Amino acid sequence: MKRRILSALYRADDYISGQELCQDLNVSRTAVWKTINQLKEEGYEIQAVSRKGYKILSSPDQITGEEVGARLQTKWLGGEIHYYESIDSTNNEAKRLAEQGAPNGTLILAEKQEKGKGRRGRTWETPGKTSIAMSFLLRPNLSPAQASMVTLVMGLAVAQACRELCGAEAKIKWPNDIVINGRKICGILTEMSAEMECINYLVVGTGINVNQQEFPLEIQDVASSLLSSSGEKTNRAKLAALCLDKFEEYFEAFLRTGDLSELEEEYNRMLAGKDSAVRVLEPGNEHEGISKGINPKGELLVELPDGTTEAVYSGEVSVRGIYGYIG
């Protein structure tokens, strides 16, 4: 009920009458009135005017299921939402729910993560009230070989959402980070349960530094936030919902072709370090070259000193700029 009323308030251009809410939601006026009062108690500023109805003026910066869900424009992503004040890891919870039969598109949100997960066993800090920690479950008809491209789809979605909502010059550091001014604001971790020929499920986890101003000493040189970059606070629920809207749009384009051919051009426009020197951190074979963008398989094309081009697969190696975190 709360999510549906919030959604109606957000979608209304102006006031929406109590009668219209009753008819659209098939509930009583008393139920609408009680929910509106409950929202006010939670920090929403809602104006009620006789013969006009209700109008939402402001909302608290929170990442609850009702708040994010009410802002979603998706068809299937986020149909079921689980929210936690604190959790070990949203990815871990998504996998637990997947094993219990949770449906495709299930979304997990947390205000705070105690054991957030990064790529290659690293941790991801998620302090409360300032960041986005979310994971969602996919049950796609894909082969395991296609799974790594889903991370790139999410990266494109986050970068585009940050640009549209915040005006930030967000770029993608292949394969799984978003950077602004060369500093990381977002990390993406995709985990898979699969058999030889098919995927049982994918979990796509995303952590975004939104309104943080301080970072642990060990990452101060490489980490940033949208607030640090722009000087303005961002509504976290609005950004999370837009990221999910964009992902669904891009993911459906990916499913149409089974690769990134429809997204390749847009991705390469936002790729950090394109046409710059990079170091390929392949175990036992570190080498340098020039980043030339991705191909339809999501591999990074690197031009080597001898003039040949290699396609680097994201599941095997990392890439860094020659002079720092990103070139």
Image: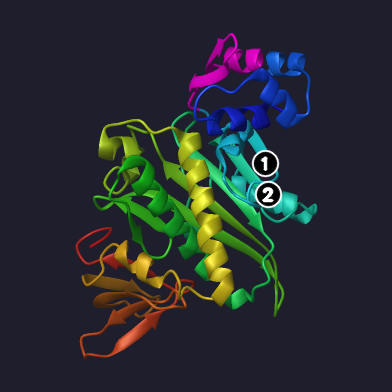
Q: Residues within 10 Å of mark 1 (few under 14, many from 20)?
A: some
Indicate the secondary structure of the residue bearing disc 1: strand
Under mark 1, the amino acid is Ile
Q: How is the image coloured?
A: rainbow
Q: Nearer the viewer, residue 116 or 60?
A: 60
- Tell me if label 2 and label 1 are in contact, CB under 8 Å: yes
Q: Is residue 95 visible?
A: yes
Who's the residue at 32% across and 32% down the image? 213
Q: Nearer the viewer, residue 169 or 93?
A: 169
Residue 80 found in image quarter:
top right
Q: Is residue 147 visible?
A: no
Who's the residue at 59% across and 23% down the image? 16
Magenta stretch in the rendered image:
36-61
Who's the residue at 76% across and 13% down the image? 30
Q: Is residue 54 above or below residue 83?
A: above
The image's mark for residue 95 is: none
Q: CA distance from mark 2 to mark 1?
A: 6 Å
Q: Is residue 254 above or below residue 122?
A: below
Quarter placement of the N terminus: top right
Q: Residues within 10 Å of mark 2 (few under 14, many from 20)?
A: many
Q: Residue 176: horizontal and vertical position, in percent?
A: 43, 60
Q: Residue 11: horizontal and vertical position, in percent?
A: 55, 34
Q: Residue 222: horizontal and vertical position, in percent?
A: 29, 49
Query: Which residue does the numbered mark 2 point to in the structure image?
Result: 106
The image's mark for residue 81 is: 1
Q: Is residue 49 magenta?
A: yes
